[in-house]
Amino acid sequence: MYKIKADTARNVMYISLKGFLNETDVKEAVLQIRRTADSLRPGFVIVNDISEFSPASPRVADEISKVQAYVNQKGCKKTIRVVGNVLSKHQVRRCQEAVRAEYEVIEVTTPEEAEKYLKQMSFEKPNPKTSA
C-alpha cells in the first residue's frame, strides 16, 4: 500500500509505503510521485514513511532508484525518512546511493518526529521589515 500527498504551501511531499509493493503498485506510486514532484517548487522536502515497508524485489527496488533520481533532478533538497524495518531502510538507502542523489537525508523513527523536524525548518517568507 502507498499514499502520496503534497503540502504545496510548505513545499513538502508526503510518501507512505506499507507492506509489500508489487511491480504494478510501485509503477503507479512512481507515476504519482513524479506528478507530485512536478507540482512542487525546487527545494522541496520529502517526508518518506517506510517504517512498515517490507523489503522489495529487485525490479521494485529499480523503480525506487529511478524515482529517487527523478526527485533529485526536480530539486528535492531534503528527505526526512521515517524508518522501522532495518532491511527496508538499507534497501532504500542503497537505491539512493546508486543514483547518487544529492539531497540530504534525515532519519527519524516516528511520523511525529518528522513533523517536529519540519516545524524547525523555516517555511515562512522572510519579513522585509525584520530581515537585515
Image (cartoon, rainbow, N blue to C red):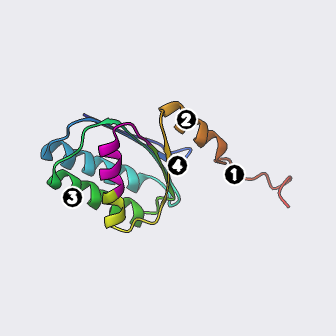
Give the residue type at disc 1. Answer: Lys
Q: Is residue 23 magenta?
A: no
Mark earlier in primary sequence (4, 1): 4
Q: Residue at x 21, y 46 (%)?
A: 56
- Drawn side of residue 85 relative to residue 9, left or right: left
Which structural element holds mark 2?
helix
- Drawn side of residue 50 relative to residue 105, left or right: left
Res. 11 mark: 4
Distance, label 2 to label 3, CA atoms, is 29 Å
Mark earlier in primary sequence (3, 1): 3
The C terminus - image quarter: bottom right
2 and 3 marks in contact (CB < 8 Å): no
Distance, label 3 to label 4, CA atoms, is 26 Å
> Magenta region: which residues?
82-93
Q: Nearer the viewer, residue 8 or 17?
A: 17
Q: Which residue is mark 1?
A: 125
**Residue count near mark 3 (Cα–Cα under 10 Å), binned few <14, some 14–19, many ≥20:** some
Q: Position of residue 98 (x, y in %)?
A: 31, 66
Give the residue type at disc 3. Answer: Asp
Circle 3 or circle 1, nearest the eye: 3
Res. 113 mark: 2
Q: Residue at x 39, y 54 (%)?
A: 37
How many numbered discs sit on the rendered protein?
Answer: 4
Mark earlier in primary sequence (2, 1): 2
